[in-house]
Image (spheres, rainbow, N blue to C red):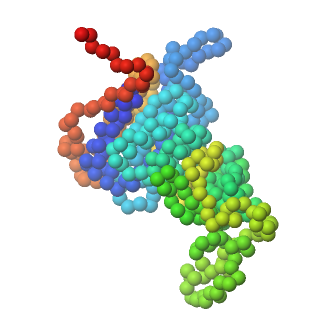
Amino acid sequence: MLQRICTALIRETVKIARRCGALKHWRGDVGIDATALPSWHKPAREGRSLASLDITAGWHFSGGSSEPTFGLSGHLALAALPRPRPGRIAQIVLGLVVDYPGRRTGMNAITLLKPLAALGLPTGTLAVDRLYTDARPETFALPARKLGYRLALDYKQNQRGIQGTHRGAVMIDGTLACPFIPATLANATHRLDDDVARHPPEITAIRINNRKPYFVHLKQGPDEAGAIRLACPAAGTSPTVNCPRRHSPHSPPRTLDLTDPRQRSTHPATRPTVIVASTQPDLLPDICRQQSITIRPGELGTLEKFRQDFPYLTDAWTSTFAGIRSQNEGVNGILKGHRIDISEPKNRLAHGRVAQTLLIALMVTMANLMILDVFCQTTQGEHLPATSYDTDPITVEPPVPAPTGRPPPQAPR
């Protein structure tokens, strides 16, 4: 019931944003981030055998910060617009979940996304940081893909590079590739630290971009069950590598127009050549022997949490992930600004997670209205019009009671 009230409050501001045209150019791209909500009370002191008065708080560890914060974690979903795209949107908060730090990370993210589907909003790219990448696939990655989102993920230092194999295809930074990809390209990001990953040197960037021809091709998109078909990069009508296993000696020679840059770039001589270690078909993996392989949801096991839809650290990934993440930080700056500061414990002195959730939900709701008012002033030259507000009261759907196996009570006769 607490989460339903919180969702209903913020959902009203999303409806207002749609009425005033603030989400007209939005394509469903969402960024989810967890922010620290410090507690007014002090943490427990083991040396003096003192407990904390706030028994619902814990230690929140933020990336880039050396000291943890004692309090709660606020999971926020943001309406984002990666660059470059035409139009403008109001970057408002789409959902809020307040929880104990480090608990139910994946499930909290899905809790933020489900109400958006109920409103009929579009689904695009979902960008999250390493906190959500580490969530179990059945709690985050698989439900997010089932809702229709593409994933843009980041990895820890020990997760970069080769992450595993599936039916012969090698998963490299969340993308399946040819098993005979050169080792220098496959290990280009092996244990790369965060500073180098954000600003890779020229040789590393070249090796990352040279991986692209070796990535398997998407032959058929997700069906109703979420299954996809992937093909060898040397197979099909548009191969990106040359492989002796896929070469046809009876293919006619191609006439090349040297003045046409497209013909020059697609000629077989310009493609890299794969060196196959074995010429015996029985010793080759499935991806080499078959025309395509089918991957169903959950077949990758633990590798499912690493799979993403943009090749890691490429230009497509950087423009999407970095753009959404920077907008996350911008909204966090508004929520923690001098007008509405959700990070200031003095602004929410009530005890317990229930009271803290309601107060933070009200503060985020007011921040959304402020963002919408500024958006209307900037784009339309007027304040948020009164016609954008709904006169109907906020309704909260009653929770469905869990079945107990007992018959309902009978009225006395």
Q: Residue at x 58, y 89 (%)?
A: 257
In this rendered view, identify the residue nearer to me: 193 or 19: 19
Q: How many marks?
A: 0
Using the image, determine if residue 217 lies above or below residue 57: below
Answer with left or right where residue 83 lies relative to residue 259: left
| Residue 360 visible in rendering | no
Using the image, determine if residue 92 lies above or below residue 275: above
Question: In the picture, residue 1 is in which quadrant?
Answer: top left
| Residue 245 visible in rendering | yes
In this rendered view, identify the residue nearer to me: 170 or 391: 170
Q: Residue at x 67, y 46 (%)?
A: 159
Q: Residue at x 52, y 22 (%)?
A: 57
> Where's residue 156, x and y in %?
65, 44
In this rendered view, identify the residue nearer to me: 408 or 65: 408
> Where's residue 286, x and y in %?
69, 60
Quadrant in which the C terminus appears = top left
Question: In the picture, residue 86 is in which quadrant?
Answer: bottom left
Residue situated furthest front in the rendering: 413
Using the image, determine if residue 198 lies above or below residue 233: above
> Where's residue 28, x and y in %?
40, 51
Q: Residue at x 49, y 45 (%)?
A: 144
> Where's residue 355, x and y in %?
40, 22
In this rendered view, identify the residue nearer to me: 385 or 29: 29
Using the image, determine if residue 99 lies above or below residue 90: above
Answer with left or right where residue 245 lies relative to residue 141: right
